[in-house]
Image (cartoon, grey):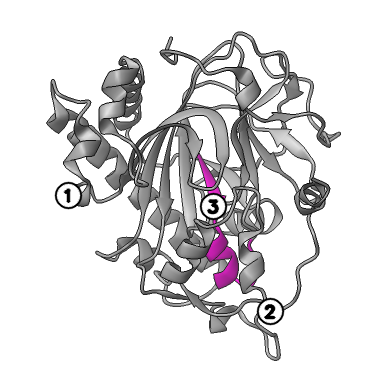
Amino acid sequence: MVVLSKPPPLKQFSTIKTFKQHTHNNNNNNNNNNNYYFSGIPVIDLSKPDSKTLLVKACEEFGFFKVINHGVPMEFMTKLESEAVNFFSLPQSEKEKAGPPDPFGYGNKRIGPNGDVGWIEYLLLRSNLDSVSPRCFNAFKENPEFFRSVVNNYISAVRNLACDVLELLADGLKIQPRNVFSKLLEDEESDSVFRLNHYPPCPELSRNLIGFGEHTDPQIISVLRSNNSTGLQISLKDESWVSVPPDQNSFFINVGDSLQVMTNGRFKSVRHRVIANSVKSRVSMIYFGGPPLRERIAPLPSLMAEGEESLYKEFTWCEYKKSAYKSRLADNRLGHFEKFAPSPTSADVVKSLF
């Protein structure tokens, strides 16, 4: 079991005092964090001919789905998880040699520069490891090249998966060229990042302790894989929160803010969070597929109906990234770029009360 060297006092962290629970969950009780698994997560078999249609529907209704028959070798997944567990099992002083995050490197508890904290430690890397500072590998003295090789193999495989999904989405939307989305991830200057997260077990947990606070991902698409531990939750259209059943053999895909803009709001960037587990470590690995910094993000004309207005102001990925990283996790980051004043979310209303 992976544990923090010196767990900080729980009073430093946020909890969810109350939240709207969805009523259509199944009866598979998750005793570790007192929620229920949601049985309605779309599961899409990428080997089936109807996958392109189902992917579009999932992006419109949830902004989130699980893919099976994804083509990523299980060996890549298990090797990387093993390396992640080895890293997070190191003494705290050793792990901190790969930090502090700038934003890349090892981080512990603090998420970004704006006051967000969580019951988490992580290692954030550029997806192009050739441009990663050697400092990020300082904790891997015994065999840093092996770790680099394992991460490279995994990132290459999940990038291909992300591009396959994006091209199937283009097919489902009946737009050309087929690589209109995927070319942004395949570009040599793609600003994609990769993150290993570790949520230690919290034996003192008697309430819903935040591991990673609610947010949307600013990039185009996120590809998530985790061990068989609970904690991930997504927000549905009615703003209820549901727990996602873990599946270590499959991948979960998030629509990001940039893809929401490129589809003029047709696809929804999903709000999600992680709740700490009282018994078991959660280890997750996420590839965030981002465009080049220079790329201009705007609704695609081929997806706009005649007379349809753009809901968003055009911006470069660099502009949006800078704006996003100045915000708190729960902020509506796209609000600054919407042409029409957005309706306040429940999170905005709660924040205004304090």
10 Å crowding of disc 2: few (<14), some (14-19), many (20+): few
Q: Which residue is mark 2?
A: 339
Q: Which quarter of the rendered picture does the N terminus lie within?
A: top left
Residue placed furthest toward the bottom = 307
Q: Position of residue 295 (x, y in %)?
A: 39, 74
Residue type at mark 1 is: Asp
Q: Position of residue 34 (x, y in %)?
A: 74, 18
Q: Earlier along the polypeptide chain: callout 1 or callout 3?
A: 1
Residue type at mark 2 is: Lys
Q: Which quarter of the rendered picture does the C terminus lie within?
A: top right
Q: Position of residue 206 (x, y in %)?
A: 72, 13
Judge by depth and name the residue closer to the eye, 160 or 36. Answer: 36
Q: Which residue is mark 1?
A: 130
Q: Is residue 249 visible?
A: no
Q: Earlier along the polypeptide chain: callout 1 or callout 2?
A: 1
Residue appearing at x 47%, y 24% in the figure: 227
Judge by depth and name the residue closer to the eye, 35 or 75. Answer: 35
- Indicate left or right for 135 with 212 as reference: left
Task: Say what secondary structure mark 1 lies in.
Answer: helix
Q: Position of residue 31 (x, y in %)?
A: 71, 13
Q: CA distance from mark 1 to mark 2?
A: 39 Å
Question: Is 258 colored magenta in this rendering?
Answer: yes
- Indicate left or right for 164 with 238 as reference: left
- Indicate left or right for 220 with 268 as reference: left
- Provide the residue span drawn in magenta: 250-267
Q: CA distance from mark 3 to mark 2?
A: 20 Å
Q: Give me the disc on residue 314.
A: none
Q: CA distance from mark 1 to mark 3?
A: 24 Å
